[in-house]
């Protein structure tokens, strides 16, 4: 079997059939996520060096000063063993600091640095513009409906505690 490198020719795509998955919600959710992440990469990652995951973690840390690494892992639905690598990245970028908890020396508390707060404010503005551009084909009502429906789906499957607010 021949391996393809790069993008297939448009003529190849014209004949592409997705089969039964074309009617599956998960397939379309994944394609939507890929499209959103691609646009994020083109507009935010290239200019700010922050991926969607890092942006989300910055938001959670900024809005929950002193949050533990374990709580961040739960909030972001990420394996606790992999959160250390991500926290290291944010710390190396100078966006957050990791302090030992005053009540439990085994626990680290996460805080934004002043440069991190400034960077997040700048990134938020860019993300808001990117999000508006990405969803421009939807009316405000359609966008709100879509967000509401997606929340219903991921909340029923989430292991995130119910007390997590958006």
Image (cartoon, rainbow, N blue to C red):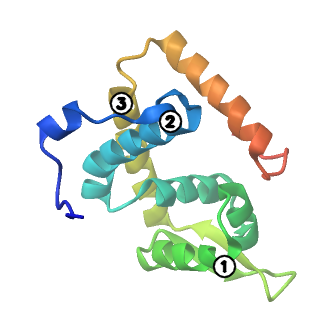
Q: Residues within 10 Å of mark 1 (few under 14, many from 20)?
A: few
The answer to whether 101 is drawn above or below residue 62 in the figure is below
Marks 1 and 2 close (CB-CB < 8 Å): no
- Going from N to C along the chain, the mark reached first, 1 or 3, is 1
In three-dimensional space, the C-alpha distance between marks 3 and 2, rounded to whole angstroms, equals 24 Å
Q: Which residue, given by chain and number where applicable, does mark 3 sit on?
A: 134
Q: Residues within 10 Å of mark 2 (few under 14, many from 20)?
A: few
Check disc 2 and report its element: helix, strand or loop. helix
* Quarter of the rendering occupied by the N terminus: bottom left
Marks 1 and 3 close (CB-CB < 8 Å): no
Q: Which residue, given by chain and number where applicable, does mark 1 sit on?
A: 81
Q: What residue sits 57% from the left and 38% below the top?
A: 26
Q: Measuring from the top left, give residue 38's x and y in whole percent.
A: 32, 46
**Residue 115 falls in which quadrant of the image?**
bottom left
* Quarter of the rendering occupied by the C terminus: top right
Q: Is residue 24 left or right of residue 33?
A: right
Q: Is residue 47 left or right of residue 151?
A: left
Which sits in the foreground, 3 or 102? 3
Label of residue 21 in the image: 2
The answer to whether 30 is drawn above or below residue 135 in the figure is below
- Going from N to C along the chain, the mark reached first, 1 or 2, is 2
Q: Measuring from the top left, give residue 42's x and y in whole percent.
A: 25, 48
Q: What residue sits 69% from the left and 64% below the top?
A: 72
Q: What residue sits 31% from the left and 51% below the top?
A: 41
Q: What residue sits 53% from the left and 10% below the top?
A: 141
Q: How many marks?
A: 3
In three-dimensional space, the C-alpha distance between marks 1 and 3, rounded to whole angstroms, equals 33 Å
Label of residue 131 in the image: none
Check disc 1 and report its element: helix, strand or loop. helix
């Amino acid at each position: 079997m021949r391996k393809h490198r790069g993008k297939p020719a448009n003529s190849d795509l014209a004949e592409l059939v997705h089969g039964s998955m074309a009617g599956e919600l998960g397939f379309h959710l994944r394609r939507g996520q890929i499209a959103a992440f691609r646009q994020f990469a083109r507009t935010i990652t290239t200019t700010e060096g922050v991926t969607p995951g890092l942006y989300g973690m910055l938001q959670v840390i900024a809005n929950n000063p002193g949050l533990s690494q374990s709580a961040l892992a739960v909030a972001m639905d990420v394996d606790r063993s992999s959160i250390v690598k991500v926290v290291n990245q944010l710390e190396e970028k100078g966006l957050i600091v990791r302090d030992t908890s005053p009540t439990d020396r085994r626990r680290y508390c996460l805080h934004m640095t002043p440069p991190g707060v400034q960077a997040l404010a700048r990134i938020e503005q860019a993300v808001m513009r990117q999000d508006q551009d990405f969803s421009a084909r939807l009316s405000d009502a359609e966008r709100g409906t879509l967000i509401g429906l997606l929340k219903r789906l991921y909340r029923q499957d989430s292991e995130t505690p119910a007390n997590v607010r958006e």
